Amino acid sequence: MTHLTHYQEITLLPEPDISSYFIWSKLFTQLHIALADVKNSHSINSIGVAFPDYYFDQKNGKSSKLGNQLRIFAPSQEDLAKLDLNKWLDRLTDYVHIKPIKDVPSDIQGYVSVHRYRFKPIEVQAQSLAKKLNISLDDAMATVAKRMPEKLVPYVRLTSETNKSPYLLKVLQQPADEPKSGLFNAYGMNGMRDNVTVPHW
């Protein structure tokens, strides 16, 4: 697998009457389409994202935030050129500032893994466990209740392109001990079981 050597940085430009939540929604709607397109057109699925100002408060989820910056990483300058962010974000020029493609600096602080966070409701977990272990639902509920509760991570409000129903893209970004190469989904993130990293500084 290849190393992520190039990146582009996007800065949100919120105004008094336009919140960063609104801009994140517009930005990720277009980015999701762009990443799906570059995968379908060029078989590129090694482009990942990171949030330099991400903050997750374990105790008070309300203070968790994505920040106002997004970095998009790729194994080569050519991959980012094919992604062509300026084309896909053309209608958002009043809301975001896109910097040119640059080399990832040599003095990065470390690595993070960024996940599309999903949490199964307690009832669903219990039903699954009861079936798996052939135990009663009450016993399964008692076991599941001891597990980690849902994390109140930052999110982006999106609308499905296929059925137009709204959904939340919940984002969990966490530090990684060492870099790990691999592929990303069409949000530029990991699922919950993968831990592919991107540079962080």
Image (cartoon, rainbow, N blue to C red):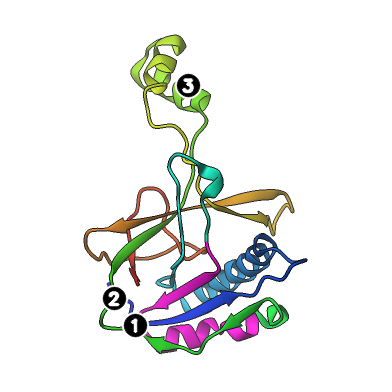
Residue in the picture at 49% in, 34% down: 120
Q: Which mark is residue 104?
A: 1
Q: Nearer the viewer, mark 2 or mark 1?
A: 2
SS class, disc 1: loop
Q: Hey, what amino acid is under mark 3?
A: Gln
**Where does the N terminus fall, quadrant-wise?**
bottom left
Q: Hey, what amino acid is under mark 2?
A: Ile
Query: Dividing the picture into quarters, in which one does residue 198 lie?
Result: bottom left
> Along the polypeptide, which appears first: circle 1 or circle 3?
1
Q: Nearer the viewer, residue 12 or 119?
A: 12
Q: Which mark is residue 127?
A: 3
Q: Nearer the viewer, residue 22 or 114?
A: 22
Q: Nearer the viewer, residue 39 or 46?
A: 46
Residue in the picture at 64% in, 75% down: 13
Q: Distance from label 2 to label 3 (Cα)?
A: 44 Å
Residue in the picture at 36% in, 59% down: 113
What's drawn in magenta, residue-wise?
67-88
Picture coordinates of residue 12 (x, y %)? 60, 73
Residue in the picture at 37% in, 14% down: 134
> Along the polypeptide, which appears first: circle 2 or circle 3?
2
